[in-house]
Amino acid sequence: MSKLFTLKLLRPNNDALIAAFVGGLLVLLLTKHSGLGISPDSIYYLSTADSIIAGKGFYQFDGMPFVMFPVGYPILLSLIKLIVGGSFLKVIPFFNALLFGTTIFIAGIILENTNHSKWLKWVVLFVIALSPSLLEIYTMLWSETLFITEIVLFIYFGKIYFEKYSLKSLVVIAVIAAIAADTRLAGVAVIATGGLLILMSPELKWGRKIQHELIYGSISISLFVMNLIRNALLTQTLTGNRQKGVTPFLENLKYYGFVLTNWLPFSKWASLMPTTIAFLFLSILIFVFLVRFLKSKEQHHYEKLAVAFTLIYSIFMLTVATISRFEAINNRLLAPFYIPCVLTISFYIASIFKISKTGIFKVALICVSILIVITLFFQYSVTDRASYLENIEGGIGGYSDDDWFISSGLLNYLNSNPAFFKGDKPIYSNAAHAVYFKTSQSAQILPERKYAHLVSAFNNKPAQILIWFNNEDNREVLTLQEVANTKKMQIMCKFNDGVIYLCTSK
Protein backbone atom coordinates (compact mmCIF):
# COMPACT_ATOMS: atom_id res chain seq x y z
CA MET A 1 0.00 0.00 0.00
CA SER A 2 2.75 2.46 0.99
CA LYS A 3 4.75 1.47 -2.12
CA LEU A 4 1.73 2.21 -4.31
CA PHE A 5 1.25 5.60 -2.61
CA THR A 6 4.93 6.45 -3.11
CA LEU A 7 4.79 5.60 -6.82
CA LYS A 8 1.57 7.60 -7.21
CA LEU A 9 3.29 10.58 -5.57
CA LEU A 10 6.62 10.35 -7.42
CA ARG A 11 5.53 9.60 -10.99
CA PRO A 12 3.96 12.97 -11.78
CA ASN A 13 6.60 14.75 -9.69
CA ASN A 14 9.83 13.54 -11.24
CA ASP A 15 10.41 17.11 -12.36
CA ALA A 16 10.08 18.26 -8.74
CA LEU A 17 12.67 15.64 -7.73
CA ILE A 18 15.09 17.01 -10.33
CA ALA A 19 14.55 20.61 -9.15
CA ALA A 20 14.93 19.46 -5.53
CA PHE A 21 18.24 17.78 -6.41
CA VAL A 22 19.47 20.94 -8.16
CA GLY A 23 18.51 23.14 -5.20
CA GLY A 24 20.19 20.81 -2.70
CA LEU A 25 23.30 20.57 -4.89
CA LEU A 26 23.57 24.36 -5.05
CA VAL A 27 23.46 24.54 -1.22
CA LEU A 28 26.33 22.04 -1.05
CA LEU A 29 28.36 23.88 -3.71
CA LEU A 30 27.93 27.25 -2.00
CA THR A 31 28.96 25.79 1.38
CA LYS A 32 31.76 23.60 0.04
CA HIS A 33 34.68 25.72 1.30
CA SER A 34 33.90 26.20 4.98
CA GLY A 35 30.39 24.90 5.63
CA LEU A 36 27.32 26.92 6.53
CA GLY A 37 27.62 30.62 7.25
CA ILE A 38 27.64 31.40 10.97
CA SER A 39 26.20 34.68 12.29
CA PRO A 40 25.68 35.83 15.90
CA ASP A 41 22.16 34.39 15.81
CA SER A 42 23.63 31.03 14.75
CA ILE A 43 25.77 31.02 17.90
CA TYR A 44 22.71 31.61 20.08
CA TYR A 45 21.10 28.52 18.47
CA LEU A 46 24.26 26.40 18.63
CA SER A 47 25.18 27.25 22.21
CA THR A 48 21.61 26.61 23.38
CA ALA A 49 21.70 23.23 21.63
CA ASP A 50 24.94 22.47 23.52
CA SER A 51 23.27 23.52 26.77
CA ILE A 52 20.33 21.19 26.08
CA ILE A 53 22.70 18.27 25.40
CA ALA A 54 24.60 19.05 28.61
CA GLY A 55 21.31 18.87 30.55
CA LYS A 56 21.43 22.53 31.57
CA GLY A 57 18.26 23.61 29.78
CA PHE A 58 17.73 26.50 27.39
CA TYR A 59 20.72 28.73 28.13
CA GLN A 60 23.00 30.47 25.63
CA PHE A 61 26.80 30.79 25.52
CA ASP A 62 27.02 33.73 27.94
CA GLY A 63 25.03 31.92 30.62
CA MET A 64 21.86 33.93 30.04
CA PRO A 65 18.44 32.29 29.40
CA PHE A 66 17.65 31.80 25.72
CA VAL A 67 14.64 34.11 25.32
CA MET A 68 15.20 36.24 22.20
CA PHE A 69 14.01 33.40 19.96
CA PRO A 70 11.70 30.39 20.40
CA VAL A 71 13.28 27.10 21.46
CA GLY A 72 12.20 24.93 18.50
CA TYR A 73 15.29 25.32 16.32
CA PRO A 74 17.87 24.74 19.10
CA ILE A 75 15.95 21.56 20.03
CA LEU A 76 16.29 20.34 16.43
CA LEU A 77 20.02 21.18 16.39
CA SER A 78 20.54 19.33 19.67
CA LEU A 79 18.90 16.22 18.21
CA ILE A 80 21.16 16.38 15.13
CA LYS A 81 24.22 16.91 17.36
CA LEU A 82 23.31 13.90 19.49
CA ILE A 83 23.12 11.75 16.34
CA VAL A 84 26.25 12.94 14.50
CA GLY A 85 28.39 14.10 17.43
CA GLY A 86 31.60 15.93 16.54
CA SER A 87 30.80 15.82 12.80
CA PHE A 88 27.98 18.32 13.25
CA LEU A 89 29.55 21.20 11.27
CA LYS A 90 30.38 18.84 8.39
CA VAL A 91 26.93 17.21 8.36
CA ILE A 92 24.69 20.25 8.82
CA PRO A 93 25.16 21.55 5.20
CA PHE A 94 23.75 18.22 3.98
CA PHE A 95 20.80 18.60 6.36
CA ASN A 96 20.10 22.09 4.97
CA ALA A 97 20.43 20.76 1.41
CA LEU A 98 17.91 18.02 2.26
CA LEU A 99 15.59 20.56 3.89
CA PHE A 100 15.74 22.84 0.82
CA GLY A 101 15.20 19.89 -1.54
CA THR A 102 12.20 18.74 0.51
CA THR A 103 10.71 22.24 0.40
CA ILE A 104 11.09 22.36 -3.40
CA PHE A 105 9.53 18.91 -3.76
CA ILE A 106 6.48 19.86 -1.67
CA ALA A 107 6.11 23.02 -3.78
CA GLY A 108 6.21 20.75 -6.84
CA ILE A 109 3.36 18.62 -5.47
CA ILE A 110 1.33 21.79 -4.88
CA LEU A 111 1.94 22.91 -8.47
CA GLU A 112 1.03 19.46 -9.82
CA ASN A 113 -2.22 19.45 -7.83
CA THR A 114 -3.21 22.81 -9.35
CA ASN A 115 -3.04 21.29 -12.86
CA HIS A 116 -0.37 23.68 -14.09
CA SER A 117 1.03 23.00 -17.53
CA LYS A 118 4.34 21.14 -17.33
CA TRP A 119 6.37 24.04 -18.72
CA LEU A 120 4.97 26.46 -16.12
CA LYS A 121 5.63 23.94 -13.36
CA TRP A 122 9.24 23.56 -14.53
CA VAL A 123 9.74 27.32 -14.64
CA VAL A 124 8.35 27.87 -11.13
CA LEU A 125 10.33 24.98 -9.64
CA PHE A 126 13.62 26.25 -11.04
CA VAL A 127 12.83 29.84 -10.06
CA ILE A 128 12.62 28.48 -6.50
CA ALA A 129 15.67 26.21 -6.80
CA LEU A 130 17.90 28.95 -8.25
CA SER A 131 16.56 31.76 -6.06
CA PRO A 132 19.42 33.76 -4.46
CA SER A 133 16.91 34.76 -1.77
CA LEU A 134 16.37 31.17 -0.63
CA LEU A 135 19.97 30.06 -1.21
CA GLU A 136 21.10 32.85 1.12
CA ILE A 137 18.88 31.33 3.82
CA TYR A 138 19.72 27.66 3.30
CA THR A 139 23.48 28.29 3.25
CA MET A 140 23.31 29.77 6.77
CA LEU A 141 22.68 28.19 10.17
CA TRP A 142 19.39 30.03 10.67
CA SER A 143 15.97 28.99 11.93
CA GLU A 144 14.37 30.34 8.73
CA THR A 145 15.55 27.15 6.98
CA LEU A 146 13.09 25.12 9.05
CA PHE A 147 10.46 27.86 9.16
CA ILE A 148 10.15 28.11 5.36
CA THR A 149 9.65 24.36 5.07
CA GLU A 150 6.94 24.52 7.74
CA ILE A 151 5.13 27.28 5.83
CA VAL A 152 5.04 25.22 2.62
CA LEU A 153 3.76 22.22 4.60
CA PHE A 154 1.07 24.43 6.14
CA ILE A 155 -0.12 25.47 2.66
CA TYR A 156 -0.08 21.86 1.41
CA PHE A 157 -2.08 20.42 4.33
CA GLY A 158 -4.21 23.56 4.60
CA LYS A 159 -5.71 22.82 1.21
CA ILE A 160 -6.67 19.33 2.41
CA TYR A 161 -8.44 20.82 5.42
CA PHE A 162 -10.36 23.46 3.45
CA GLU A 163 -11.61 20.80 1.03
CA LYS A 164 -13.30 18.58 3.61
CA TYR A 165 -13.07 20.41 6.97
CA SER A 166 -12.23 17.17 8.78
CA LEU A 167 -11.07 17.36 12.39
CA LYS A 168 -8.04 15.19 11.56
CA SER A 169 -6.74 17.64 8.95
CA LEU A 170 -7.59 20.55 11.28
CA VAL A 171 -5.35 19.07 13.98
CA VAL A 172 -2.56 18.58 11.41
CA ILE A 173 -2.46 22.25 10.35
CA ALA A 174 -2.82 23.34 13.98
CA VAL A 175 0.24 21.26 14.94
CA ILE A 176 2.24 22.66 12.00
CA ALA A 177 1.27 26.22 13.02
CA ALA A 178 2.28 25.47 16.64
CA ILE A 179 5.71 24.19 15.57
CA ALA A 180 6.17 27.17 13.22
CA ALA A 181 5.47 29.60 16.09
CA ASP A 182 7.99 27.70 18.22
CA THR A 183 10.56 28.04 15.43
CA ARG A 184 10.25 31.77 14.72
CA LEU A 185 8.31 34.46 16.58
CA ALA A 186 6.95 35.41 13.14
CA GLY A 187 5.19 32.05 13.22
CA VAL A 188 2.26 33.89 14.78
CA ALA A 189 1.54 34.91 11.17
CA VAL A 190 1.01 31.22 10.35
CA ILE A 191 -1.35 30.90 13.32
CA ALA A 192 -3.21 34.05 12.24
CA THR A 193 -3.52 32.82 8.65
CA GLY A 194 -5.25 29.61 9.66
CA GLY A 195 -7.48 31.36 12.19
CA LEU A 196 -8.59 34.05 9.75
CA LEU A 197 -9.31 31.62 6.92
CA ILE A 198 -11.41 29.39 9.19
CA LEU A 199 -13.31 32.45 10.45
CA MET A 200 -14.00 33.70 6.91
CA SER A 201 -14.89 30.31 5.43
CA PRO A 202 -18.38 30.50 3.87
CA GLU A 203 -18.79 26.71 3.94
CA LEU A 204 -18.71 26.30 7.72
CA LYS A 205 -21.80 27.07 9.78
CA TRP A 206 -21.17 29.26 12.83
CA GLY A 207 -21.54 26.49 15.40
CA ARG A 208 -18.98 24.27 13.66
CA LYS A 209 -16.84 27.30 12.85
CA ILE A 210 -16.53 28.23 16.54
CA GLN A 211 -15.72 24.62 17.40
CA HIS A 212 -12.95 24.49 14.78
CA GLU A 213 -11.57 27.87 15.86
CA LEU A 214 -11.33 26.69 19.47
CA ILE A 215 -9.59 23.44 18.50
CA TYR A 216 -7.23 25.14 16.07
CA GLY A 217 -6.51 28.07 18.38
CA SER A 218 -5.81 26.01 21.50
CA ILE A 219 -3.40 23.69 19.68
CA SER A 220 -1.67 26.27 17.49
CA ILE A 221 -0.82 28.72 20.29
CA SER A 222 0.14 26.06 22.86
CA LEU A 223 3.92 25.92 22.31
CA PHE A 224 4.15 29.67 21.75
CA VAL A 225 2.33 30.45 25.01
CA MET A 226 4.46 27.96 26.94
CA ASN A 227 7.56 29.65 25.53
CA LEU A 228 6.34 33.11 26.60
CA ILE A 229 5.43 31.92 30.12
CA ARG A 230 8.91 30.41 30.55
CA ASN A 231 10.54 33.64 29.34
CA ALA A 232 8.45 35.73 31.74
CA LEU A 233 9.32 33.52 34.71
CA LEU A 234 13.05 33.63 33.95
CA THR A 235 13.55 37.21 32.81
CA GLN A 236 10.30 39.10 33.51
CA THR A 237 10.13 39.75 29.74
CA LEU A 238 8.22 37.92 27.04
CA THR A 239 10.95 37.93 24.36
CA GLY A 240 13.95 39.55 26.02
CA ASN A 241 14.87 43.22 26.24
CA ARG A 242 13.63 44.98 23.11
CA GLN A 243 13.80 48.68 22.32
CA LYS A 244 11.07 50.82 20.79
CA GLY A 245 11.25 51.19 17.03
CA VAL A 246 13.21 54.05 15.52
CA THR A 247 12.42 53.36 11.85
CA PRO A 248 9.22 55.03 10.51
CA PHE A 249 6.67 52.93 8.66
CA LEU A 250 7.40 54.55 5.28
CA GLU A 251 11.10 53.81 5.64
CA ASN A 252 10.31 50.20 6.47
CA LEU A 253 8.07 50.12 3.42
CA LYS A 254 11.05 51.27 1.35
CA TYR A 255 13.26 48.49 2.76
CA TYR A 256 10.44 46.03 2.06
CA GLY A 257 10.34 47.28 -1.53
CA PHE A 258 14.12 46.92 -1.95
CA VAL A 259 13.86 43.24 -1.06
CA LEU A 260 11.04 42.72 -3.55
CA THR A 261 13.00 44.42 -6.34
CA ASN A 262 15.85 41.94 -5.85
CA TRP A 263 13.38 39.10 -6.34
CA LEU A 264 11.91 40.59 -9.52
CA PRO A 265 13.24 40.57 -13.07
CA PHE A 266 14.76 43.86 -14.24
CA SER A 267 15.77 44.48 -10.62
CA LYS A 268 18.12 47.39 -11.40
CA TRP A 269 15.25 49.34 -12.92
CA ALA A 270 12.77 48.29 -10.20
CA SER A 271 15.19 49.27 -7.40
CA LEU A 272 14.82 52.94 -8.42
CA MET A 273 11.30 53.00 -6.94
CA PRO A 274 11.17 50.56 -4.00
CA THR A 275 8.38 52.33 -2.08
CA THR A 276 6.14 52.36 -5.17
CA ILE A 277 6.85 48.68 -5.80
CA ALA A 278 6.03 47.87 -2.16
CA PHE A 279 2.79 49.87 -2.22
CA LEU A 280 1.64 48.27 -5.49
CA PHE A 281 2.52 44.79 -4.29
CA LEU A 282 0.59 45.18 -1.02
CA SER A 283 -2.37 46.76 -2.84
CA ILE A 284 -2.54 43.83 -5.26
CA LEU A 285 -2.33 41.36 -2.36
CA ILE A 286 -5.20 43.07 -0.54
CA PHE A 287 -7.27 43.23 -3.74
CA VAL A 288 -6.71 39.55 -4.58
CA PHE A 289 -7.42 38.50 -1.00
CA LEU A 290 -10.72 40.40 -0.86
CA VAL A 291 -11.84 39.23 -4.32
CA ARG A 292 -11.19 35.61 -3.35
CA PHE A 293 -13.62 35.89 -0.44
CA LEU A 294 -16.19 38.11 -2.10
CA LYS A 295 -16.46 35.51 -4.86
CA SER A 296 -17.15 32.88 -2.14
CA LYS A 297 -16.19 29.93 -4.30
CA GLU A 298 -13.21 27.64 -4.87
CA GLN A 299 -12.15 28.51 -1.35
CA HIS A 300 -10.15 25.29 -0.99
CA HIS A 301 -7.50 26.30 -3.54
CA TYR A 302 -3.87 26.74 -2.60
CA GLU A 303 -3.85 30.35 -3.77
CA LYS A 304 -6.16 31.36 -0.91
CA LEU A 305 -3.63 30.09 1.63
CA ALA A 306 -0.62 31.51 -0.23
CA VAL A 307 -2.14 34.97 -0.68
CA ALA A 308 -3.46 35.13 2.89
CA PHE A 309 -0.13 34.15 4.41
CA THR A 310 1.88 36.54 2.21
CA LEU A 311 -0.41 39.43 3.17
CA ILE A 312 -0.56 38.65 6.90
CA TYR A 313 3.17 38.00 7.15
CA SER A 314 3.97 41.24 5.28
CA ILE A 315 1.71 43.30 7.57
CA PHE A 316 3.21 41.58 10.62
CA MET A 317 6.82 42.33 9.61
CA LEU A 318 6.13 45.96 8.66
CA THR A 319 4.27 46.54 11.93
CA VAL A 320 6.86 44.87 14.17
CA ALA A 321 9.74 46.66 12.40
CA THR A 322 7.99 49.98 13.10
CA ILE A 323 7.12 49.48 16.77
CA SER A 324 10.21 47.46 17.78
CA ARG A 325 13.89 48.05 17.10
CA PHE A 326 15.88 45.38 15.27
CA GLU A 327 17.79 45.00 12.02
CA ALA A 328 16.37 46.77 8.98
CA ILE A 329 13.91 44.74 6.90
CA ASN A 330 16.02 42.56 4.62
CA ASN A 331 15.89 39.38 2.57
CA ARG A 332 16.31 37.15 5.61
CA LEU A 333 13.21 38.59 7.27
CA LEU A 334 11.03 38.43 4.15
CA ALA A 335 12.27 35.18 2.55
CA PRO A 336 9.59 33.11 4.40
CA PHE A 337 6.94 34.42 1.99
CA TYR A 338 9.07 34.03 -1.16
CA ILE A 339 7.63 30.62 -2.11
CA PRO A 340 3.98 31.53 -1.28
CA CYS A 341 4.46 34.67 -3.36
CA VAL A 342 5.91 32.76 -6.35
CA LEU A 343 3.15 30.16 -6.10
CA THR A 344 0.49 32.89 -6.07
CA ILE A 345 1.94 34.57 -9.16
CA SER A 346 2.07 31.21 -10.98
CA PHE A 347 -1.60 30.50 -10.14
CA TYR A 348 -2.73 33.72 -11.80
CA ILE A 349 -0.35 33.43 -14.75
CA ALA A 350 -1.92 30.04 -15.44
CA SER A 351 -5.39 31.60 -15.21
CA ILE A 352 -4.46 34.36 -17.67
CA PHE A 353 -3.19 31.80 -20.18
CA LYS A 354 -6.40 29.79 -19.86
CA ILE A 355 -8.67 32.76 -20.59
CA SER A 356 -6.53 34.20 -23.41
CA LYS A 357 -8.10 32.84 -26.59
CA THR A 358 -7.22 35.51 -29.17
CA GLY A 359 -4.29 34.40 -31.31
CA ILE A 360 -2.38 37.70 -31.35
CA PHE A 361 -2.90 38.33 -27.63
CA LYS A 362 -1.78 34.82 -26.73
CA VAL A 363 1.36 35.12 -28.89
CA ALA A 364 2.21 38.47 -27.30
CA LEU A 365 1.62 37.01 -23.84
CA ILE A 366 3.91 34.07 -24.59
CA CYS A 367 6.65 36.38 -25.91
CA VAL A 368 6.49 38.66 -22.86
CA SER A 369 6.50 35.62 -20.54
CA ILE A 370 9.57 34.16 -22.25
CA LEU A 371 11.40 37.50 -21.99
CA ILE A 372 10.60 37.78 -18.26
CA VAL A 373 11.63 34.18 -17.55
CA ILE A 374 14.92 34.49 -19.45
CA THR A 375 15.70 37.77 -17.68
CA LEU A 376 14.92 36.29 -14.27
CA PHE A 377 16.97 33.13 -14.83
CA PHE A 378 19.91 35.18 -16.16
CA GLN A 379 19.68 37.54 -13.17
CA TYR A 380 19.52 34.67 -10.69
CA SER A 381 22.33 32.71 -12.32
CA VAL A 382 24.64 35.76 -12.33
CA THR A 383 23.97 36.33 -8.62
CA ASP A 384 24.42 32.63 -7.77
CA ARG A 385 27.68 32.46 -9.72
CA ALA A 386 29.02 35.55 -7.95
CA SER A 387 28.09 34.01 -4.58
CA TYR A 388 29.83 30.77 -5.50
CA LEU A 389 33.05 32.51 -6.58
CA GLU A 390 33.06 34.57 -3.40
CA ASN A 391 32.27 31.64 -1.11
CA ILE A 392 34.77 29.24 -2.68
CA GLU A 393 37.49 31.85 -2.15
CA GLY A 394 37.16 32.29 1.61
CA GLY A 395 33.88 30.84 2.82
CA ILE A 396 30.50 32.43 3.52
CA GLY A 397 30.79 35.73 5.36
CA GLY A 398 30.54 35.17 9.10
CA TYR A 399 32.40 33.36 11.85
CA SER A 400 33.02 30.25 9.72
CA ASP A 401 34.90 32.09 6.95
CA ASP A 402 38.69 31.95 6.68
CA ASP A 403 39.31 35.42 8.11
CA TRP A 404 37.64 34.45 11.38
CA PHE A 405 38.02 30.71 11.75
CA ILE A 406 41.49 30.13 10.25
CA SER A 407 43.44 33.39 9.97
CA SER A 408 42.50 35.01 13.29
CA GLY A 409 45.60 35.09 15.46
CA LEU A 410 43.51 36.15 18.45
CA LEU A 411 41.03 33.27 18.13
CA ASN A 412 43.82 30.75 17.50
CA TYR A 413 45.58 31.93 20.68
CA LEU A 414 42.39 31.62 22.75
CA ASN A 415 41.67 28.19 21.29
CA SER A 416 45.12 26.87 22.21
CA ASN A 417 45.01 28.38 25.72
CA PRO A 418 41.81 27.19 27.43
CA ALA A 419 43.34 28.05 30.80
CA PHE A 420 42.89 31.70 29.84
CA PHE A 421 39.18 31.34 30.66
CA LYS A 422 39.79 29.83 34.11
CA GLY A 423 40.89 33.06 35.83
CA ASP A 424 38.98 35.01 38.46
CA LYS A 425 38.26 38.06 36.31
CA PRO A 426 35.11 38.26 34.15
CA ILE A 427 35.83 38.14 30.41
CA TYR A 428 34.05 40.41 27.92
CA SER A 429 34.32 40.67 24.14
CA ASN A 430 32.84 42.67 21.29
CA ALA A 431 32.65 39.32 19.43
CA ALA A 432 31.81 36.87 22.23
CA HIS A 433 29.89 34.79 19.67
CA ALA A 434 33.08 34.19 17.65
CA VAL A 435 34.97 33.26 20.81
CA TYR A 436 32.41 30.57 21.61
CA PHE A 437 32.30 29.23 18.04
CA LYS A 438 36.09 28.79 17.89
CA THR A 439 36.85 27.76 21.46
CA SER A 440 33.54 26.55 23.00
CA GLN A 441 34.42 28.90 25.89
CA SER A 442 32.08 31.51 27.33
CA ALA A 443 32.67 35.26 27.34
CA GLN A 444 30.23 38.03 28.22
CA ILE A 445 28.93 40.24 25.44
CA LEU A 446 30.30 43.78 25.73
CA PRO A 447 27.24 45.86 26.72
CA GLU A 448 25.27 47.79 24.15
CA ARG A 449 25.19 51.48 25.02
CA LYS A 450 21.36 51.59 24.78
CA TYR A 451 21.12 49.37 27.90
CA ALA A 452 22.19 51.80 30.62
CA HIS A 453 21.92 49.25 33.45
CA LEU A 454 24.28 46.81 31.67
CA VAL A 455 26.78 49.58 30.91
CA SER A 456 26.65 50.68 34.56
CA ALA A 457 27.23 47.11 35.77
CA PHE A 458 30.22 46.81 33.44
CA ASN A 459 31.70 50.13 34.60
CA ASN A 460 31.25 49.25 38.28
CA LYS A 461 33.29 46.06 38.09
CA PRO A 462 36.75 46.64 39.60
CA ALA A 463 38.53 44.61 36.92
CA GLN A 464 37.76 42.59 33.82
CA ILE A 465 39.41 41.27 30.68
CA LEU A 466 38.32 42.63 27.31
CA ILE A 467 38.90 40.60 24.13
CA TRP A 468 38.66 43.14 21.32
CA PHE A 469 38.39 42.15 17.63
CA ASN A 470 39.24 44.83 15.07
CA ASN A 471 37.12 43.25 12.32
CA GLU A 472 33.87 42.94 14.30
CA ASP A 473 31.45 45.56 13.00
CA ASN A 474 28.94 45.77 15.84
CA ARG A 475 28.29 49.46 16.29
CA GLU A 476 25.74 48.94 19.07
CA VAL A 477 28.28 47.83 21.70
CA LEU A 478 30.64 50.17 23.56
CA THR A 479 33.65 51.39 21.57
CA LEU A 480 37.21 51.19 22.87
CA GLN A 481 37.12 54.92 23.54
CA GLU A 482 33.91 54.58 25.57
CA VAL A 483 35.50 51.80 27.63
CA ALA A 484 38.67 53.90 28.09
CA ASN A 485 36.56 56.77 29.47
CA THR A 486 35.90 54.78 32.64
CA LYS A 487 38.66 52.14 32.65
CA LYS A 488 42.44 51.92 32.65
CA MET A 489 43.29 49.66 29.72
CA GLN A 490 46.49 47.64 29.82
CA ILE A 491 47.47 45.56 26.78
CA MET A 492 47.97 41.90 27.73
CA CYS A 493 48.40 40.42 24.22
CA LYS A 494 48.30 41.90 20.73
CA PHE A 495 47.50 40.07 17.49
CA ASN A 496 46.99 40.76 13.81
CA ASP A 497 43.23 41.12 14.27
CA GLY A 498 42.75 42.29 17.83
CA VAL A 499 43.97 42.95 21.36
CA ILE A 500 43.38 41.50 24.82
CA TYR A 501 43.11 44.21 27.47
CA LEU A 502 43.11 44.15 31.24
CA CYS A 503 40.58 46.79 32.29
CA THR A 504 40.64 48.23 35.80
CA SER A 505 38.74 51.07 37.42
CA LYS A 506 40.25 54.53 37.18
Image (cartoon, rainbow, N blue to C red):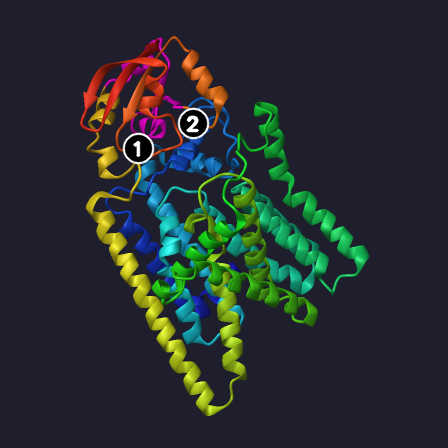
Residue pictured at 28% horizontal, 44% vertical? 396
The residue positioned farthest toward the front in the image shown:
485
Nearest the viewer among 494 and 323 is 323
Is 35 situated left or right of 45 in this image? left
Q: Residues within 10 Å of mark 1 (few under 14, many from 20)?
A: some
Marks 2 and 1: CB-CB under 8 Å?
Answer: no
Vertical comparison of 73 with 304: above or below: above
The residue carrying mark 2 is 448
Q: Position of residue 42 (x, y in %)?
A: 39, 37
Q: Position of residue 368 (x, y in %)?
A: 40, 79
Is 307 situated left or right of 272 in this image? right
Q: Amino acid at mark 1?
A: Glu
Q: Earlier in the sequence, mark 2 or mark 1?
A: 2
Q: Mark 1: which secondary structure?
A: loop
The residue carrying mark 1 is 472
Residue 423 is one of the magenta-drawn residues: yes
The answer for how far apart the CA atoms under marks 2 and 1 are is 14 Å
Tell me if residue 196 can be seen.
yes
Q: Amino acid at mark 2?
A: Glu
Magenta part of the chain: 417-446
Q: Residues within 10 Å of mark 2 (few under 14, many from 20)?
A: some
